[in-house]
Every structure is written in structure tokens, then in C-alpha cells.
Image (cartoon, grey):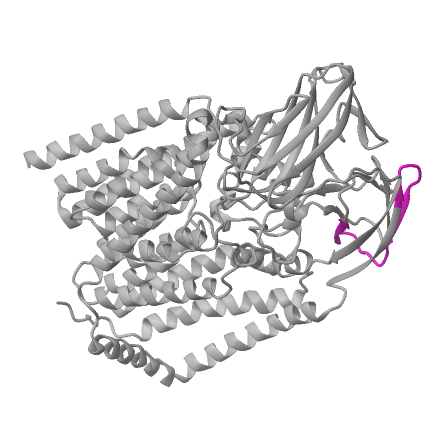
């Protein structure tokens, strides 16, 4: 009794101290105004768009919508939103810590259970990632679901697993250990039925209004490339997993985006694999290892807790990507998988997480120390994590499943076929299938309709002096339109006689090597016809102006013989300086013979700074160099942070940056920008007053549900609930699986 009381006191002290420490760390004003989550909701708000109806999102609905009330409460205040976001996540993390203790003590006792909770509490990566990740939203109900397996509460378990799956997809796999945990056939039906009903009822409103947008939320991950895993290293992809597309393409169904954006090796959202068979192979391995582990642990008494953790680890081992935000979930599942001896796996995993974070955040916290080591740090973190996962999987498969286990499982599954002897049940199932087919007919008709998604293309001659246009006819109010312009020239664009918002974007703004000659425009139609007109903002030149065309800076570009002349003036209207940036794509290997020659003069006025950006395609890093008037970049040149890391790298982009103070002007004459190496890259200067460009127009018309579609869909769901209840009643009250 004293031991129990002592452990409870320690638990309460641990939770109290942990909550206070979290509150203090999350109160620090770091990254408050850079919240990616705030920008998600701000974009929806500015467009009056409803998530999962008008636009797809990157997460299932609960994992995304849970923070939306915070935006409504702290609109126009990103810092307050970030604090509220952290407060919610901190509360969820503290609750998860408590449930972890309750789950662990049932397996290893109170004292060791307290240690398990303590191990998770002190991990720095968990605290750091939880400040910006939504993983904890799925983790808490998932761990609660595992706890309900221990408490033999099937209905609550199914409900919690459904909520967890609707927050992030992985917890759907936890239904496997749940089926092992509940030995009564009725409980098995309850846990599966409750989980499915939860998934269906939360999804039903979105499926009724716009099923294609809702489904796109889940299937768009299938076209992504690998990131920060051993599989990404095999692909020679060393960048992060962010989707760099402009926000407006969320309005389009994913299967239509595949027609708009051809797969490419520089586009992580719609990626072209070098090893084309690798994604399919990884999926097959995921299925195989999950099945093998399930069969191995099926008849092992009370091992569903460990199996829950092992299924996550095995799934992530063959998953194509791994983000730092996964640091919230992975240690907890690893603790469950190795609950009797966790530190031998937990310590190297935490080291890999910290190193992975350092490899990316070094640009913020210590670029002068760590930026040079970005790629080695990332590779080391990936390899160390892979070793931990592989070692854990191999260790867990010491006892192999037998053929008898496999045949026994199939016999048990076939035994459920006896239920189909009930004519009423068969009739009800047939009705569900018919209703589902009736509702799907309308979906198929939409896909076959030529007006649901169409495109046309052509050529357009633009100039600096006249507006030239494209007319888009046959529209309906609400149609989404994307225009792809094949040009690197900056264009002024407008919709004549319309107040509709016109947006522009670049497919990958951080790697213009692939999207240099592309600009995308987007609008939502409000009439049957729209006239889209264009005018060149500057002459056609060999560079893409990425900064300086909008805002407080006026710029003109002329060609003086073989030199460019840039006349730049900050209007002094916003109280801030301006930046003018010219980008040029190239493909040059940096060796001992590499030279980049930059010659310019400031003919009039004064600049505050002239810099040269170099995008290193080898480790996906941007280096900035201070550029004097006669500057030569070599393989051993030192960048702005005192580092040198270009030797033996592949450069895909260079950019010249001219900065002006507020209300300042300057005339800059660019005489030379040339690259020499074993692969010479010549830049020919030219300035042409007009250009003929190729354009493509893509038009999507959203699915509009009819009354019959809604009736058939809702009827199928309602009948499914009734059938689940009938099956539960038809099963024998108790049928215990064999244990060993």
C-alpha cells in the first residue's frame, strides 16, 4: 500500500513539474509569428473556403479542424494563436503522459510504469516537436484506445481508435491488436463496428457535400516523394518533405492536379521516382511485415500493447518519409514495443531525432557552426534511426509464426461465413451494396462528364506597352481556373470587368531549376466568361526576377551594349528597404576549375548590400555570399556565415540580390555573370520588348450532389449500422481464442 501511495505521489509530482516546465518553455517567444498552422487558416478565411468541401487539406479532419477555433478566437494575432496552439498541445501531451503511465503499469507494474512515463517526459525532441506538430492530437486517443484494450471496453476502444485515425491515418492499424485483445466475438464486432461507424459518421457530411475533395485529402500523399529516410537517400533526395506548391491548387481534386503538374524529380508533391518500383515495393513490405508481426504475436498472452508499438515501428520503417514532427509519436510507440527494456532502443532514437532537428534548424540557431555539416548530420540521423527500427523488428521476430497459426486464422475467418445463412442479413447486405452502387453511379457520371475538368492551350504575344488577353468561356459560378504560363518574365495580370481575386504562384519557389519557366495563376469564376489580360513588367531577359516586382520598389531594365542597367528606386512609402533579386538556373559541378565571375558597378545612388545566392542541389541548401564589384566565386569561397561547402557539389541556381534602404535609389550596371568549369555555363545577356509565350488553361467544376445521391448514401450508412447490430446479436456470447 505504501508503495502504491508513494508511486502515485511521484506520478502527480512528475505531471505537475512536467506541466510547469512545458508552460515555461512554450511561453518563450520563439517562432510565434512563423506559425504554418496560422497561415493555413488565414488562407481559408481570406477565401471564404470550407476545408474538405472547397479545398483539400494535408491531414484528416479532426487533426486539422481541432485548431480552427483558435484561429477564430485570435484572428489577426499570429502570436496569440501560437501561444494558444502550444497550450492545447501541452495539455494533450500531459494527458498522454498520464495515460502512458496507466497503460504501462498494467504490463510492468507501477514502479516500472512510472519510469516509462518519465523516459517519455524527459525527451527534448518530444517537447520541441510538440510545439508545432499535430501528432499529439492522434497520439492521445490512440494510447487511450490501447488502454481500453486492457480495460476490455470494446465500444470505447473502437470510438477512440476511430478518432485517432481521423486525426492521423496510422492508428487504423491498431485495430489488429484490438482484435487480439478482445476474445469475445461480440466484443470484436463492437470494436470494429464502433471504429468504422466513427469514421463514417465524421466523414459523412464531407462525403455528402463534396466526396472528391474529401478523398483527395487522403490520396494526395500517394504521389509524394521520399524524404529524410534511407529510401530518400537511395533516391538521392536530401531535402525535407514540405509540399511547396501554391496554396490555391488545394481547390483542385488531386486526380486533376496530376494532369496539371506532370511528375518531376524537383517537385516533392508530385514526384517522379528515379527507382520507379520502389514506392510499390515499400507498400508491399509494409503489408508483409504488419501481417508477419500480427501472426507472430497473435497467440502470445497480453502482448497487444507491445504489438501496438511494433506495428507503428514496422510501418514507419518502410514509410517513404520521416519528418521531425514524428518525434512526438515514435518514442511513445517504441516504449510500448520495448516496454521491458526500452533504453537500448530509446537513447539512439532520441539522438537521431536531435541530430535530424539540428541538421535543419542550424540555419536558425547556429549557421556559423552547423550549416556546413547539414548533409552529414542528416545522413547520420537517418542511418541511426533506420538501424534502431531494423534492430527492433528483427528482435521481435525471434519466434516465427507457424503454418498452423495461418491456417487457424483462415478457419476462424471462414467460420464467420455462417452468418450469411441468415436470409434477413444477406438481404440487408445486398441492399447496402445496391444503395452504395446507386450513389456511386452519380460519381462515375461526374468523372465521365467532359465539363467536370477541361483544358485548352495556345500562344500569346505579350509586350510592355499593350495588354493582351485570353478569354475563358463556358464557365459557371464557382468553377476553379488555373492558368499555366510558360515564361520566366514577370507579368502584370488582371481579370477585366471582375472583382474576383487573382493569385499567382510558382510550383517550387525554393528550387527554380525545374520551375524557372513557369508561372501559375488562379481564380474562381463568378460569371460565364472571364477575360484575363497580361502585360510585361520588364523586358524578356535570361533571369527570373523573384523579388522586387511588387511593393515599394520601382525598377526598369535596359540593355547597354553587352551590359544590363538596373534603375532601382524605393518609394519610401512603407518605411522599409527593398530587395531586387535576379535568379538564373544552371547545372554545374563545383570542382577545382570552377569559377563564377560577377562584375558590376553602382553607377549612381547607393545600395545597402549586394549578395550572391547559390543553391546547392546536392544537399538542398542555399548559400549566400557577399559580392564585391569584381567578385569571383570558387569552390573554397567563404559564405556569409563563414562556411565553405560548395566543393564537389552540384549547383542548380544562382541569384544576384541588390538591397536598398528606405527611400533610396541606385543605378546598377551588370557587366558580367559567367560560370566556367569542366561544364561551362554561359549567360547571354539580352532584353527583348515582347515575347510569345505558351499557355494552358485548366478548368475544374466541382461535383454537385443531387438529392438522390444524398438519400442513397445516407441510407447505405444507416442500413450498415443496423446490419452491424444484427451481426453482433447473431454471434455467440463467448468464444475464447486459444492462448499460450
Instruction: Kindly identify the residue that appears in the image at 51 percent across and 49 percent down.
Output: 61
Would you say 153 lies left or right of 248 here? left
The C terminus lies in which quarter of the figure?
bottom left
**Residue at position x 11%, y 32% from top?**
6
Residue ID at (71%, 42%): 682
Q: Is residue 417 above or below residue 605?
A: below
Does residue 144 appear to the left or right of 231 in the view shown? left
Task: Answer with the quarter of the image where residue 465 lies.
Answer: top right
Tell me if residue 16 is in the magenta stretch: no
Looking at the image, residue 493 sits to the left or right of residue 135; the answer is: right
On the image, the x and y values in percent for residue 119 come to 23, 37
Q: How many discs appear?
A: 0
Q: Nearer the viewer, residue 306 or 427?
A: 306
Q: Is residue 715 visible?
A: yes
- Nearest the eye: 553 or 173: 553
The region drawn magenta spans 462-485
Q: Is residue 152 visible?
A: no
Please state the horizontal and vertical placement of residue 314, each as a whole percent of the image.
32, 57
Image: 594 above or below 411: above
The quarter of the image holding the N terminus is top left
The residue located at (80%, 30%) in the rendering is: 563
Q: Is residue 635 above or below residue 288?
A: above
Quadrant for residue 542, please give it.
Answer: top right
Given the current orientation, which residue lies at the most extreme left position?
Answer: 2
Can you give x and y, in whole percent of width and height, for residue 234 in the image?
44, 55
Camera-nearest residue between 462 and 182: 462
Viewed as shown, does residue 527 lie left or right of 146?
Answer: right
Q: Is 110 in front, or is 203?
A: 110
Q: Is residue 287 above or below residue 356?
A: below
Pinpoint residue 198: horizontal percent, then vertical percent: 43, 57
Amino acid at each position: 500500500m505504501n508503495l502504491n501511495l508513494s508511486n502515485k505521489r511521484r506520478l502527480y509530482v512528475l505531471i505537475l513539474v512536467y506541466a510547469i516546465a512545458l508552460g515555461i518553455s512554450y511561453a518563450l517567444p520563439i517562432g510565434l509569428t512563423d506559425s504554418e498552422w496560422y497561415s493555413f487558416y488565414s488562407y481559408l478565411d481570406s477565401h471564404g473556403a470550407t476545408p474538405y468541401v472547397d479545398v483539400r487539406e494535408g491531414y484528416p479532419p479532426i487533426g486539422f479542424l481541432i485548431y480552427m477555433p483558435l484561429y477564430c478566437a485570435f484572428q489577426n494575432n499570429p502570436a496569440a494563436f501560437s501561444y494558444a496552439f502550444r497550450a492545447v498541445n501541452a495539455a494533450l501531451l500531459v494527458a498522454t503522459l498520464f495515460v502512458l503511465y496507466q497503460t504501462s503499469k498494467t504490463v510492468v507494474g507501477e514502479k516500472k510504469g512510472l519510469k516509462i512515463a518519465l523516459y517519455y517526459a524527459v525527451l527534448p525532441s518530444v517537447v520541441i516537436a510538440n510545439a508545432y506538430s499535430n501528432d499529439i492530437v492522434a497520439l492521445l486517443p490512440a494510447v487511450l484506445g490501447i488502454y481500453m484494450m486492457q480495460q476490455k471496453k470494446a465500444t470505447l476502444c473502437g470510438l477512440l481508435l476511430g478518432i485517432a485515425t481521423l486525426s492521423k491515418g496510422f492508428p487504423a492499424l491498431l485495430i489488429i491488436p484490438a482484435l487480439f485483445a478482445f476474445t469475445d466475438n461480440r466484443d470484436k464486432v463492437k470494436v470494429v463496428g464502433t471504429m468504422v461507424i466513427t469514421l463514417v459518421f465524421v466523414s459523412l457530411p464531407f462525403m455528402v457535400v463534396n466526396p472528391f475533395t474529401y478523398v483527395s485529402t487522403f490520396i494526395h500523399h500517394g504521389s509524394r516523394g521520399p524524404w529524410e529516410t534511407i529510401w530518400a537517400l537511395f533516391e538521392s533526395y536530401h531535402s525535407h518533405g514540405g509540399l511547396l506548391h501554391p496554396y490555391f491548387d488545394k481547390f483542385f481534386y488531386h486526380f486533376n492536379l496530376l494532369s496539371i503538374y506532370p511528375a518531376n524529380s524537383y517537385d516533392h508533391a508530385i514526384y517522379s521516382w528515379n527507382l520507379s518500383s520502389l514506392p510499390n515495393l515499400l507498400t508491399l513490405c509494409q503489408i508483409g511485415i504488419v501481417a508477419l508481426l500480427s501472426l507472430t504475436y497473435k497467440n502470445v498472452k497480453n502482448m497487444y500493447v507491445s504489438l501496438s508499438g511494433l506495428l507503428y515501428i514496422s510501418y514507419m520503417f518502410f514509410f517513404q518519409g520521416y519528418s521531425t514532427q514524428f518525434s512526438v509519436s515514435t518514442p511513445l510507440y517504441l516504449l510500448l514495443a520495448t516496454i521491458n527494456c526500452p533504453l537500448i532502443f530509446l537513447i539512439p532514437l532520441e539522438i537521431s531525432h536531435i541530430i535530424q532537428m539540428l541538421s535543419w534548424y542550424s540555419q536558425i540557431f547556429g549557421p556559423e557552426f552547423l550549416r556546413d555539416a547539414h548533409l552529414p548530420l542528416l545522413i547520420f540521423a537517418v542511418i541511426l534511426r533506420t538501424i534502431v527500427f531494423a534492430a527492433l523488428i528483427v528482435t521481435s521476430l525471434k519466434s516465427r509464426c507457424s503454418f498452423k497459426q495461418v491456417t487457424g486464422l483462415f478457419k476462424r475467418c471462414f467460420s464467420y461465413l455462417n452468418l450469411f445463412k441468415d436470409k434477413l442479413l444477406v438481404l440487408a447486405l445486398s441492399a447496402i451494396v445496391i444503395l452504395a452502387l446507386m450513389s456511386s453511379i452519380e460519381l462515375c457520371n461526374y468523372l465521365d462528364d467532359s465539363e467536370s475538368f477541361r483544358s485548352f492551350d495556345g500562344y500569346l504575344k505579350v509586350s510592355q506597352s499593350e495588354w493582351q488577353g485570353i478569354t475563358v468561356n463556358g464557365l459557371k459560378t464557382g468553377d476553379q481556373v488555373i492558368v499555366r504560363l510558360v515564361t520566366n518574365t514577370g507579368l502584370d495580370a488582371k481579370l477585366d470587368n471582375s472583382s474576383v481575386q487573382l493569385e499567382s504562384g510558382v510550383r517550387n519557389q525554393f528550387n527554380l531549376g525545374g520551375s524557372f519557366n513557369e508561372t501559375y495563376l488562379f481564380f474562381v469564376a463568378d460569371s460565364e466568361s472571364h477575360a484575363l489580360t497580361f502585360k510585361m513588367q520588364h523586358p524578356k531577359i535570361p533571369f527570373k526576377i523573384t523579388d522586387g516586382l511588387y511593393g515599394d520598389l520601382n525598377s526598369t531594365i535596359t540593355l547597354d551594349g553587352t551590359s544590363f542597367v538596373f534603375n532601382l528606386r524605393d518609394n519610401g512609402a512603407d518605411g522599409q528597404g527593398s530587395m531586387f533579386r535576379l535568379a538564373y538556373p544552371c547545372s554545374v559541378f563545383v570542382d577545382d576549375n570552377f569559377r563564377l565571375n560577377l562584375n558590376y558597378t553602382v553607377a549612381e545612388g547607393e545600395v545597402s548590400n549586394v549578395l550572391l545566392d547559390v543553391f546547392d542541389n546536392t544537399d538542398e541548401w542555399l548559400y549566400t555570399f557577399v559580392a564585391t564589384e569584381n567578385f569571383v566565386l570558387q569552390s573554397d569561397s567563404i559564405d556569409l556565415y563563414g562556411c565553405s561547402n560548395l566543393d564537389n557539389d552540384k549547383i542548380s541556381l544562382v541569384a544576384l540580390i541588390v538591397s536598398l534602404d528606405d527611400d533610396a535609389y541606385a543605378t546598377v550596371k551588370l557587366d558580367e555573370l559567367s560560370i566556367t568549369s569542366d561544364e561551362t555555363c554561359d549567360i547571354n545577356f539580352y532584353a527583348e520588348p515582347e515575347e510569345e509565350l505558351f499557355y494552358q488553361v485548366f478548368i475544374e467544376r466541382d461535383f454537385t450532389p443531387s438529392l438522390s445521391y444524398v438519400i442513397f448514401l445516407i441510407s447505405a450508412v444507416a442500413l450498415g449500422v443496423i446490419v452491424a447490430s444484427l451481426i453482433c446479436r447473431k454471434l455467440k456470447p463467448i468464444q475464447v481464442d486459444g492462448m499460450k
